[in-house]
Amino acid sequence: MTPSRRRLTALAAATTLVLTATAGVAHAEVPPDAPEQIRNGDFSDGTSPWFSYGTDALAVTDGRLCTTVPGGLANLWDAGIGQDAVSLIAGAEYELSFDVSATPGSAVKAVLQLGSAPYTTYAEAGATATPGSVHVDKTFTAPADNPSAQLIFQVGGSADAQTICLDNVSLRGGEAAPPYEPDTGPRVRVNQVGYLPGGPKHATVVTDATDPLPWQLRSAGGTVVADGQSAPRGVDAASGQNVQTVDFSAFRTPGTGYTLTVDGETSHPFDISGALYDRLRADSLQFFYAQRSGTPIDGDLLGAAYARPAGHLGVAPNQGDTDVPCQAGVCDYRLDVRGGWYDAGDHGKYVVNGGIATYQLLNTFERTKTAETAAGGAGLGDATLRVPERGNQVPDVLDEARWELEFLLRMQVPAGQPLAGMVHHKIHDRNWTGLPLAPQDDPQPRELHPPSTAATLNLAAVAAQCARLYAPYDAAFATRCGTAAKTAYAAAKAHPAVYASAADGNGGGSYDDSNVTDEFYWAAAELWLSTGDQAYLTDVTASPLHTADVFAAGGAFGWQSVAALGRLDLATVPSALPAADRTRVRASVTAAADRYLATVREQAYGLPLPGDAGSYVWGGNSNLVNNAIVLGTAFDLTRDARYRDGAVQSADYLLGRNALNMSYVTGWGEQHARNQHSRIFAHQLDPNLPNPPAGSLAGGANAALQDPFVANLLAGCKPMFCYVDDINSYSTNEVAINWNSALAWLASFLADQGDAGAVPAARCAVTYTTHGSWTGGFTTQVTVRNTGPTAVNGWSLRWAFTGDQKVDTAWLAKVSQSGATVTAKNESYNAKIMPGASITFGLNGLTAGGPNPNPNLITLNGSACTLS
Ligand code: 9MR
Ligand code: 9MR
């Protein structure tokens, strides 16, 4: 609508106009060239960045923003349409104007306010909207500064359902927002935490220079301990900066407080140490306890600032999660879906995202059975985390994952109901809530959303993992998981195309996915690995994904694409997969790792993510971590140090070697993210609340700028700059369980690398032969040959069973078992194995019906043997 038409409409509508004078006195003079503070107020750009609550989805109809509002809402503010990040300057004059219609007709109020409690009003303008458009115009003086105020149209409170439309929303006045300039500190960018003594050590220097520059590495005392020349790299696409790189890998002396100086700039200090990441493993896993729903968080465990009552246990003002109905029309039963983890900064619980996060925690543990550097499993045992279950003889990471597994199992449709065996996609608030909001204070009704094939297959996959991994600790729980997994898989096959709707995103994320071939592949793979049942292998090999390249450059896997989870487990978890297929599956992992390595070399900031804008997406930090996980897995499979070094180097980006000179992990590095979007850890909004706990990973740079706070602030950013450490930016700076689960895997891998020195040659060869197996039992003979140059004097051989196998009796060795881990130690008479000589021992074992494949990792005194 043109301005002149607007004025005419204003006159025509003057009779129905009601102005409510509140904060600010009406003023006449707002200069004609005053800057516009509302984004997309004419809706020519679609619905973004407008949001609503308590209404149906927003849509642009005939150039206006329209939606319907249910009748019978008690208050005007029970439904709203709004925009965040509106800038107000105290004392400046503004003109707020808009056109609004309502059919059949209703009161509407525009409020400029603080977007979170106590929702201070800065100005408001009310109207009685009718089917014909009403124009509202109001001038006021802003009573306060707020660079991020909220404009909300309150549209609830009418007895009848209404169709509401808005157009020409404008707030003119104040000043144009000054260009945002992040403080990026010294131009020499390093891993602010440090480097492993034997590992790669790279830095990036932002400079105008195009010729190599001299660099100096200094000890904490200021002595130059190494120097050299940097390598010009030209303009880096991801950051838009001209950069050079420094490689000081040859310097291996442990110490603290090193700095790197290039081009007159000195980096943040960092350490060189083999123990850098020991605490990061625990910190990153600790995030999950902090996110637990349905249980009080114990301040003695997590720190007093994090203590809180249980959330969503049906205690007022909470309305859930112990007896939750479906959305209207979806089902007529109610479920107890207490527990689990809150997904992210919101209080929603989503099965597909819970699925991948649980997978990654379980896989972090399963790696202790299959990876040489993790085989000790010490960092992942019982009493390694601050969780209430510590000391129960079960590895704490399994206790934590179980908290979510129990919730996921509750989301399964009970027998006797329509779609029995399927799994509800998600449960969350009916409407979006504001920030901050403690879980126990959430007053919104909670609702189950329809079952989906994707959610059903997520449960099938992780419950299958559960069946094998918990068998040594809690056979009954493992059996319950196994049954649920099989039921879910069968239900998914019966209902293979039930998709969550992309439009179902009010009050919670949609997590929609309309391609579930990858979920089918992943679930079939996990069921095959846990049951050894041929039918699942048939489905695995029949999937076109089994031979496809499933490792995307921009992210090997994620909540929406899970084929690589199946592929990685087929490559690493022992099974009776035919040898040729296993070889091919493993080669697909190393081929992907080769490509990620090439990307690490190509990127001047040394990360395994391409430099184009399309690779910097919502949660992109988890994508680069997941690519690093493929590198780590390739190392576990091959012992080729190039892959390990690629994974180690990937951590540099997360911990400060990036365009913003920012560590994305709270509490780690000199300059780290601390204001992530979270209703619980909302310190930025309320100083009485804590920041996210140490070890919380921010979503990271997102070139699509998908929240209103960054849409203006960062407009035009180069991909690596599209991030701000502000609680309002949920599309660049949220926390989420699937991002921290990726960090936990990588942190655990890094902690396991110690100094990351040379990989020793194998010094032993083992033949592991199961001579006979029968229902409930098997007999195995193990021969160890010393292939090294020196005698072995005293040996301890270790491997892990896949699932429910138990050692019964043994001969010619002392054999013991803890969890799934079997340790065979020499008798006094066979302690010595001369070079070239062998010893043999045997054992009888029991199974509860699970498969009994040969282990694919056997260590002698901690070092891997070759297997035949
Ligand atoms: O807080 C929500 C965050 O967890 C989600 O990732 C995001 C996108 O679904 O939405 C956030 O909630 C905002 C909502 O979408 C619009 N109104 C403001 C809410 C809080 O910032
Ligand atoms: O991680 C999700 C990301 O891949 C999507 O692009 C985004 C928008 O749909 O949603 C992200 O997930 C959010 C979820 O919808 C609601 N809880 C917070 C999640 C993290 O931001």
Image (tube, rainbow, N blue to C red):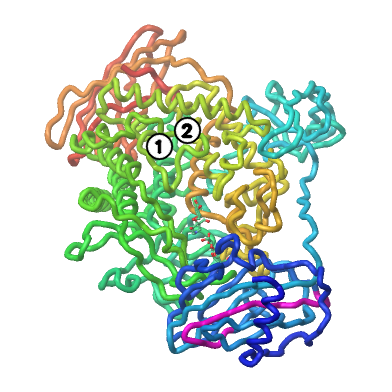
Q: Are marks 1 and 2 in contact (CB under 8 Å)?
A: yes
The image's mark for residue 630 is 2
Kindly report the distance in space between the C-alpha atoms of the residues bearing marks 1 and 2: 9 Å
Which quadrant does the N terminus fall into? bottom right
Q: Does residue 59 belong to the magenta stretch?
A: no
- At x 76%, y 55%, the residue is 180
Name the amino acid, label 1. Answer: Ala
Q: Name above or below for residue 49 compared with residue 123.
A: above
Local secondary structure at mark 2: helix
- At x 42%, y 56%, the residue is 389
Q: Does residue 105 belong to the magenta stretch?
A: yes
Q: Residue 127 vs residue 186: left or right?
A: left
The image's mark for residue 564 is 1
Image position, residue 832 (x, y; %):
38, 14
Magenta part of the protein: which range? 90-108
Q: Nearer the viewer, residue 863 or 506?
A: 506
